């Protein structure tokens, strides 16, 4: 595939290309341009030229364009899902959910174009004050490989709804679906230069997006380490940032919970997308009174999960890249070496081509051994004695993205929701994130919010106008 500059397919000025590999087979499925800082400059020029045109389209017309793009995404859902599975690894059913979810994201933003508004007041002695929300101009969108279509939708949908141009930088292991989505947006009517996708590495293209002074806002989803370097690199240009940097969500099962529902929820969440979701249930905290039952039922459910090429009927695909599989394997090996948990099932790479790792259950995990996020198919179960200690363990990591409490008791639910320091708390659910819900974290999980109505504060800037009398 080619990249996408000024509404047109383009080669990199470098003339070089990078291979995209199917994580289930190790086969090369396509190549993409290895972009450079000059390609980012070309995208910024195109964005600068067309952003005012896009901003001046009426809210109703913007809405129609985003709705038409969503309709096209729905019409192509099967082929987009196949493309996503082939580059990312997730089972086809999950890929289709993500594509349809992405269509919904654009429908959501289509519904918001007429609601990008500030406020007004009559100020005696001074006149009428109007605060209008203006587009920022050009927004950078740095997207990871785990949910590429959906996360691109969050960033591009919000930026476009507010009248901005977008320069997107997909991950170099899952860029293809995003390239097709960008093409769909332009065909639907987004002004060409308002939609750019520059492919290439994070250290070259990503860095150039972050440092470019004409890109006034960057929304970044990725690791804490890269998020920190993005914040430092953005500082000289005094650029606004929205940072979503992963999490280590606690999934707390109280003794009074519906254990079967909790087991189903935990297994579904933890192994969804091969465990590679920022807000998946990464640490399962279970009350000692029900922990044996929980582990026994979870083991039975996990052993039923089929693992294989996402294009076949499987419950779980491979990890997206071999580095990620190595990182997961060494995290599990370390827990075993330290005697900080007992492997109940899994705990090893699977033989053959592809980045497969067995769905893994670790019982009696020591809280300190799983302080760092394990971004893969590993479910550590931590046993707790009191709700207070569960909340303390939940809060004991550097992250603060999501958490859930499973209980039938309103006081338990309320206490956990109040005291867990995270951007989202679910009660008897986990990982439910339609675009209507504001999403983002606290502590090392980053700052700023995507979606909900909070996106307006991230993707516009206020202008106060006083009309004197
Ligand atoms: O992330 P990176 P990686 C976590 C997860 C995973 C780890 C590493 O724990 O194991 O991060 O994954 C671009 N300037 N998450 O290495 O490096 C990069 O090209 C600008 C959690 O893939 O953060 C890609 O597009 N951009 C997470 C994006 O940043 C740069 C999702 C993310 O890459 C850059 C993914 C730079 N200097 C991983 N360097 C979540 N929050 O859900 C890289 N990039």
Image: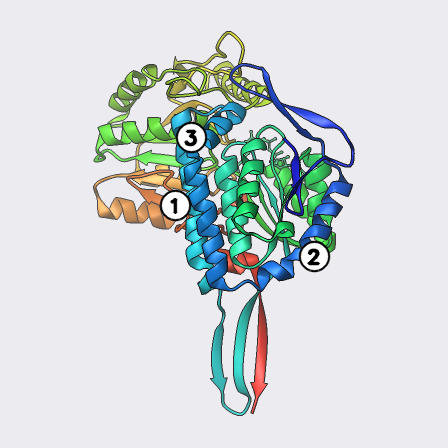
User: Could you tell whether 357 is left or right of 303 in the image?
Assistant: right
User: Could you tell whether 100 is left or right of 35 in the image?
Assistant: left
In the rendered image of this protein, does residue 229 appear above or below residue 321?
Answer: below
Report the residue at 49% width, 23% height from top.
Answer: 89
Residue beneath disc 1: 434
Q: Position of residue 215 (x, y in %)?
A: 68, 53
Residue beneath disc 3: 78
Q: Confirm whether residue 280 shows in the render.
A: no
Q: Confirm whether residue 148 shows in the render.
A: yes
Secondary element at tag 3? helix
**Residue, far top:** 351
Q: Where is residue 418 in the image (x, y as percent from the top left)?
A: 36, 50
Q: Do the residues labelled 2 and 1 touch (CB within 8 Å)?
A: no
Relative depth, front residue between 198 and 145: 198
Q: Earlier in the sequence, mark 3 or mark 1?
A: 3
Q: Do the residues labelled 3 and 1 touch (CB within 8 Å)?
A: no
Residue 433 sits in which quadrant?
A: top left
Q: Where is residue 268 in the image (x, y as percent from the top left)?
A: 34, 28
Residue 99 sits in which quadrant?
A: top left
Relative depth, front residue between 178 and 449: 178
Classify mark 1 as within 8 Å of ligand 1 or not, answering yes or no.
no
Label 2, residues with CA under 10 Å away: few <14, some 14-19, many ≥20: some
Could you tell me how far apart the alpha carbons at marks 3 and 2 are, in whole angstroms? 35 Å
Label 3, residues with CA under 10 Å away: few <14, some 14-19, many ≥20: some
Report the residue at 64% width, 57% height from top.
Answer: 51
In the rendered image of this protein, does residue 119 appear above or below residue 203?
Answer: below
Where, quadrant-wise, is the C terminus in this rendering?
A: bottom right
Q: Position of residue 356 (x, y in %)?
A: 49, 15
Secondary element at tag 2? helix
Label number found at residue 49: 2
In the rendered image of this protein, does residue 133 appear above or below residue 215?
Answer: below
Secondary element at tag 1? loop
């Amino acid at each position: 595939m080619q990249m996408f500059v000024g509404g047109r397919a383009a080669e990199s000025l470098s003339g070089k290309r990078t291979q995209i590999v199917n994580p289930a087979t190790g086969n090369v499925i396509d190549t993409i341009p290895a972009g450079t800082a000059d390609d980012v400059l070309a995208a910024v020029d195109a964005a600068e030229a067309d952003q005012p045109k896009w901003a001046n389209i009426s809210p109703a017309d913007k809405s129609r364009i985003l709705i038409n793009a969503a309709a096209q995404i729905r019409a192509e859902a099967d082929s987009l899902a196949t493309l996503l599975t082939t580059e990312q690894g997730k089972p086809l059913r999950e890929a289709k959910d993500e594509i349809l979810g992405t269509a919904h994201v654009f429908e959501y933003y289509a519904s918001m174009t007429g609601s990008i508004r500030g406020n007004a007041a009559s100020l005696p002695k001074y006149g009428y004050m109007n605060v209008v929300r203006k587009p920022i101009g050009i927004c950078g969108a740095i997207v990871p490989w785990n949910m590429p279509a959906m996360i691109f939708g969050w960033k591009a949908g919000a930026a476009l709804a507010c009248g901005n141009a977008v320069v997107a930088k997909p991950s170099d292991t899952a860029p293809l679906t995003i390239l097709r989505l960008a093409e769909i947006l332009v065909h639907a009517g987004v002004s060409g230069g308002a939609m750019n996708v520059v492919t290439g590495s994070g250290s070259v293209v990503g860095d150039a997006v972050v440092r470019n002074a004409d890109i006034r806002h960057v929304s970044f989803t990725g690791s804490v380490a890269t998020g920190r370097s993005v914040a430092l690199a953005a500082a000289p240009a005094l650029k606004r940032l929205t940072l979503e940097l992963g999490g280590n969500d606690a999934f707390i099962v109280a003794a009074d919970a519906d254990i079967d529902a909790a087991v189903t929820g935990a297994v579904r969440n933890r192994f969804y997308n091969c465990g590679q979701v920022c807000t998946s249930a990464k640490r399962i905290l279970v009350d000692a009174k029900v922990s044996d039952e929980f582990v026994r039922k979870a083991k039975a459910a996990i052993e039923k999960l089929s693992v294989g090429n996402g294009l076949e009927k499987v419950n779980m695909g491979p990890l997206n890249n071999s580095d990620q599989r190595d990182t997961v394997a060494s995290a599990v090996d370390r827990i075993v070496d330290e005697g900080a948990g007992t492997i109940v099932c899994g705990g090893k790479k699977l033989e053959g081509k592809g980045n497969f790792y067995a769905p893994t259950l670790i019982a009696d995990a020591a809280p300190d051994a799983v302080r760092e996020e394990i971004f893969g198919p590993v479910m550590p179960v931590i046993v707790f004695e009191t709700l207070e200690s569960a909340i303390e363990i939940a809060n004991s990591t550097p992250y603060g993205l999501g958490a859930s409490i499973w209980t039938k008791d309103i006081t338990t639910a309320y206490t956990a929701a109040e005291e867990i320091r995270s951007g989202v708390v679910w009660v008897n659910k986990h990982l439910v994130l339609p675009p209507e819900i504001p999403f983002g974290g606290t502590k090392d999980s980053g700052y700023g919010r995507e979606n909900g109505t909070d996106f307006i504060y991230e993707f516009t800037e206020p202008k106060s106008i006083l009309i004197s009398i």
